[in-house]
Amino acid sequence: MKRSNSSTFKFIVIATLAIVVLVIAGVIIYNTNSQSSQGMVSGKQPPIEDQPTLGDSDAPVTIVEFGDFKCPACKAWGSDVFPKLVNDYVDTGEVKFSYVNVLFHGEESELGSLAAESVYKQNPDAYWEFHKALFEAQPSDDHDRSWITTENILEIASGVSGIDTNDLKSSIENNSEMDAVNRDSELASEIGVQFTPTIMINETIIEDPFDYESIKEVIDSELEEN
């Protein structure tokens, strides 16, 4: 009886250890497949149909920025990282870049997004210049103060060729492009965006959007696969 109990105990211990090893192996495999040193693979590439998109529509790599016009980090990313990205990859035809609105800062985020969507609907060719000008109008300090107003938006738009400010004002007042704003907000929620800017390269969410070398590594890896 003692020998039988001892054998049973050993079997239980071995079986338990085997299960633990399998669980650990599964975790390692999962982490290897879902994470890299540059970011997290989401498993889903955001759709960019009807989104403002810069670059060759047939480019093999898609980059999506989830951003907020009220976000200081988004302004910094747009001035520090974005121009390098355009020069190195968008202008070469290897990457197309799209922007999705995120509404993390309340009513002003919504108004800025509504204005941008209205400009895009009115004249897609004027969108990116307006996009840049709106970010440049963001104050360099006291970020919480109100600055995205209809009056300021119209003043900014008046300096961008190809925008009818009367039509823009009417579109803003009538919330004409609110469906597009809501669509972006739903997409950001679906992807699980938790901070701005969130940068996605195909299915990979970049861990540090300001680490340009990591961004390049992911882009180059995706280009090798396509």
Image: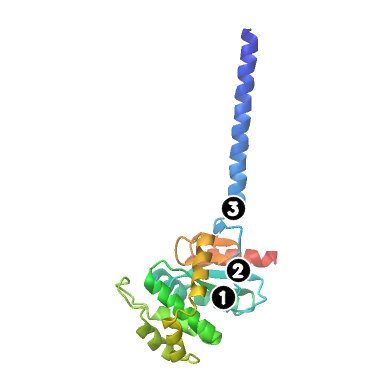
Residue at the (57%, 70%) spot, across then down: 63
Q: Classify mark 2: residues with Cα within 10 Å, few (<14), some (14-19) or many (20+).
A: few
Q: Is residue 195 above or below residue 177?
A: above
**Residue 159 in sight:** no
Total marks drawn? 3
Residue identifier under label 3 = 34
Whole-percent x and y of residue 101? 48, 71
Give 16 or 90, whichever is nearer the viewer. Answer: 16
Mark 1 or mark 3: which is in front? 1
The reply to whether callout 2 and callout 1 are in contact (CB within 8 Å) is: yes
Q: Amino acid at mark 1?
A: Gln
Distance Cα–Cα, label 2 vs label 1: 8 Å
**On-image quarter of the C terminus:** bottom right
Element under label 1? loop
Whole-percent x and y of residue 225? 69, 64
The reply to whether callout 1 and callout 3 are in contact (CB within 8 Å) is: no
| Residue at the limit of the structure toward the top, as seen here | 1
Q: Is residue 157 left or right of residue 121?
A: left
Distance Cα–Cα, label 1 vs label 3: 27 Å
Distance Cα–Cα, label 2 vs label 3: 20 Å
Whole-percent x and y of residue 61? 63, 70
Q: Amino acid at mark 2?
A: Pro
Q: Is residue 220 above or below residue 55?
A: above
Residue identifier under label 1 = 51
Residue identifier under label 2 = 47
Residue at the (60%, 50%) spot, across then down: 32
Residue at the (42%, 81%) spot, across then down: 134
Q: Quadrant of residue 6?
A: top right
Q: Classify mark 3: residues with Cα within 10 Å, few (<14), some (14-19) or many (20+).
A: some
Whole-percent x and y of residue 217? 58, 64
